[in-house]
Image (spheres, rainbow, N blue to C red):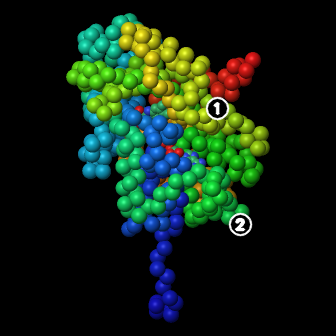
Amino acid sequence: MTQTGKVKQPHRESSLLIIGAGTFGTSLAVHASKACAGGSHITIIDRWSPDASVHDKNAAAVDINRIIRTDYASPLYSRLAHEAIHFWSWGMEYQGHFHKAGWVVFDGPEHDDSFRKHVQQTAEERGSNAVDLIDVKEFINKHEILSGLSKERTGDCYRNPKAGWVKAANATKAYLRIAESRGVRRVTGEVEELLMRDDGIGLKGVRLHDGTTLEADRVVVAAGAWTSSLLSPLEDRLNIAHKDRIERQVTAVGRLSAYYKLSEGEVMEMMEAKLPIIVLGRELDIIPPFFHIPYLKVNDLKTEFTNTVTTGSRQQITAPDIRHQKQVPLELVRRSEKIIKSNLPDWAQSRTPEHWRICYDAVTPTEDWVLSQHPDGRLKNMFVAVGGSFHSYKFLPVAGKYLLNVLNGKSNGEEMDQAWKWKDETELRQKSAKEFGQSPQRLNRLDLQDMKRKTRL
Ligand SMILES: Cc1cc2nc3c(=O)[nH]c(=O)nc-3n(C[C@H](O)[C@H](O)[C@H](O)COP(=O)(O)OP(=O)(O)OC[C@H]3O[C@@H](n4cnc5c(N)ncnc54)[C@H](O)[C@@H]3O)c2cc1C
């Protein structure tokens, strides 16, 4: 009882619903549950159970491995990556996931040294000499996988021994468990619709595929490449103009990875030769095998594609294809095979991947994240956390800390606030992508719908 005679209400944390237990959603769940005693006011929902098979889960935060590196041209993401790698290396909660294999980055067939030079400049400004040029011929000779390559083809290369990889499927699952152990409620289900409050101001919650509804004071959409397809029907209903829609901020883009199954002998050979992660500039990422992960994974960095669909109000949006992630159109396989074989001329010539996988990410024009409220005043209690742009898994330990500040109306400092805001047309037109600029893969993106039409003809 207060002096004025009113009964004092116990403090109630406002309830929070996070849609998507990928990189951004999981990170937020952990940080939000740490920020206040008990996380029982927080619910996180994902269509996949943490225990579902890695082969089926089409989420960018789930794979046999993801690269963790600190090399960025952008000083902002370099700083963040240093913050994150500290947790991957030393954080109790991350122990056992990070494998410090180092990485070697070649300029690539175009001999484009801009990434290396920018990384070097950013590192030097941080007082580090991380960019260590190495002898190309010696490196090629040491690793059988590169047999048949020459410096004329690869250009120069540098090594940073601090980089490594994590088994992303396991690390994401383990991190989500931390949130659960702090009281966060995890729900497995497909969010089908975002529901408005009865007075038309603010989101009430969500309706799931099975008809269940979940309500919350605040909703965070962290649905990765599915963000636009989830939000667009609501934007349709609210008649939101094209320029203020989520599709203007992010594009759902797919890339292909090839998984080469190795024999025990091959795994041991590569491990004994200390095969690092290799990046063949703008063409391929090669991620080495490990005892219990007997695969050499090769990411095709050159072939990017979208899947354009039309919404109820005739807006064109991008959304991941509904086919299983391992059902890859033949034309894409052929393209990727050609790129892999031209970059690994001897090793890949007579080998076929055990399987291919399509993985989608939400890509922003500037490669910055979008951690923001929706600009429409009727959606003030809804936030989006999206824009991984093929580089954001590494930030799993830290992204949620900054996102939580956004939710609480706190600034992350001028530089981050500007980078992660919902950008207007002028900003979107003025700013180019941070790491790779107007790269050829961006300009030459294919669309699955066009490919389907061509196949039908
Ligand atoms: C091929 C490829 C290679 C990459 N390599 C690297 C790398 O080496 N290093 C690195 O740092 N980053 C890498 N990335 C990028 C990184 O994986 C992503 O940037 C990051 O995972 C994006 O996080 P997210 O939370 O936005 O999306 P996601 O991790 O995809 O999470 C979104 C979640 O939302 C769920 N969801 C969506 N819609 C619904 C719905 N309607 N109902 C319920 N749940 C829903 C999904 O199931 C998913 O779990 C790579 C990405 C790809 C595609």
Mark 1 and mark 2 in contact? Answer it, CB < 8 Å: no
Instruction: Find residue 320 and report its horizontal and vertical position in percent.
Output: 60, 36
Give x and y (percent) for residue 124.
30, 30
Upstream in the sequence, badge 1 or badge 2?
A: 2
Tell me which residue sits at (53%, 36%) in the image: 361
Residue in view at x 52 percent, y 54 percent: 188
Query: Which residue is under mark 1?
Result: 307
Front residue of 122/264: it is: 264
Q: CA distance from mark 1 to mark 2?
A: 34 Å
Left or right: residue 273 versus residue 346 is left
As drawn, 348 above or below 320: above
98 relative to 357 in the view: left or right: left
Q: How many neighbours does mark 2 have within 10 angstroms: few (below 14), some (14-19), or many (20 or more)?
A: few
* Label drawn at residue 181: none
The x and y percentages for residue 262 are 34, 22
Identify which amino acid the numbered label 2 is placed on. Answer: Asp
Q: Which mark is residue 198?
A: 2
- Which of pointers 1 and 2 indicates the residue nearer the eye? 1
Q: Quadrant of residue 113?
A: top left
Q: Circle 1 sits in a helix, a strand or a loop, which is it?
A: loop
> Circle 2 — which element?
loop
Vertical relation: 141 (above or below) 171: above
For this rendering, which residue is in front, 350 or 273? 350
Identify which amino acid the numbered label 1 is placed on: Asn
